[in-house]
Amino acid sequence: SLSLSLSLSPGKRLWHQLTSCLAEFVSNEANRRGDNFIQLYQQFLAKFEGKLNQLEFAKIANCVALSHEDPQAAVAFYDAMLEKRMRLGAEATLYLELLLWLYKLTSRAGDAGDRAKTLSDVKQVIESKRPELDALEGVMDTCVHSTYYHLATEFFKEAGPHESYYKHALMLLAYTPMDSMSAEQATSLATDMSLAAISGDSVYNFGEVLATPIVGALVGTPNEWLGELLRCFNKGDIEQFNMLVDTYSSEYFAQPALKLRHNFIKEKLALLSLMNFLFETPSHDRNIPFAAIADRTRLPLDQVEWLAMRAMSLELIKGSMDEVDQILHVDWVQPRVLDNDQMSHLADRLGEWSEKVATASNFITDQTPELLG
């Protein structure tokens, strides 16, 4: 218990146990009573903070800072901690710097002019602190990386573009355990990532987010349909998309990111439908008639050429078109993270290829025994 740990004299050098107990106590919001966290720091922790693991101390200091009701007092506390950067070391200092800017960004204190400056400052922090973050590669505790990408996602969520938010949110998931998020945080992140993936200009690989457990946070919530929509885009399933939009029309068009970009989203889905069609087509048979593409993508025949040119300009596919015979010749399709159904399809293709190799090998063996011994 905390009382037992506090009764232990710091002179006994039980710093690790004491640190763990303090961290557990202040990280639980239920333990907060008025300014008791602040008093705990001032009257107890401040006397021996230099003897603790400094990164763990920084985590405790963050909880103390967040317990200030006055935003200016919280910022002043962060600044006071950062004055000890020589003792803190590079990792703990970077961690507190990122937490300070995350607090400034999310507290939304000040007028519109202050907000614009805060966004500008945060953008500079994200760019300037990246080399320091990269220098920490290989460390066991991922809290600094998690905080960096948390700051970046909050910034790009407000400032845009959607694809930058999505990219940094994926990195946030890579460094942040799901069990460290509250249900509310996970649901909010899953909602925002789904919207960013669907409406983002350069996001055509949905398998990355579907491979994480974050989309599961939408199950049982009013936004569960967004997870279905995300899986629909991953498969390029136009019929399923139309059904979902009809079923959840009010919810769909209540989202500004979807309502304002509805035409772009339909274009994006057609491109994904083409990519999935090509993925399902054997690589030796990728001379696709325009009519087959029109049937798969539900587009008029006269729009297939535009769709193919758009896919090539985005480097989703590489190939050429025979406009006379109306054939699309495809040499390459952008690699993607596959879901279970797509992996199953790929396994079937590999099985077919293996059978063809075996047949060819047997033929050569039968026809040229003198060469093969």
Image: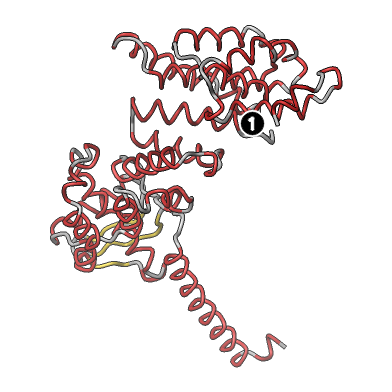
Which quadrant does the C terminus fall into? Answer: bottom right
Q: Residue at x 47, y 39 (%)?
A: 182
Q: Which residue is drawn at the image coordinates 31% and 50% (left, top)?
A: 226
Note whether 135 is above or below 362 in the view shown: above
The residue nearer to you, when weighing 25 against 338, is 25
Q: Residue at x 19, y 54 (%)?
A: 245
Residue 266 pos. (x, y %): 21, 50
For the rendered model, the colour scheme is: secondary structure
Q: Is residue 49 left or right of residue 27?
A: right
Q: Percent position (x, y) of residue 87? A: 72, 12
Depth check: give the residue in front, 245 or 73. Answer: 73
Residue at 64% from the left image edge and 14% from the top image edge: 41
Asked if 232 appears above or below 258 in the picture, the reply is: below
Q: Is residue 228 above or below residue 6?
A: below
Q: Position of residue 288 (x, y in %)?
A: 28, 67
Quadrant where the N terminus sits is top right
Q: Nearer the viewer, residue 150 or 63?
A: 63
Towards the viewer: 27 or 195: 27
Image coords of residue 325 (percent x, y): 20, 66
- Quarter of the figure with residue 77: top right
* Secondary structure at numbered mark 1: helix
Mark 1 sits on what residue? 24
Q: Amino acid at mark 1?
A: Glu
Left or right of 280, for residue 264 = left
The reply, left or right, for residue 144 in relation to residue 66 is right
Badge 1 local density, few (<14 within 10 Å), some, or many (20+)? some
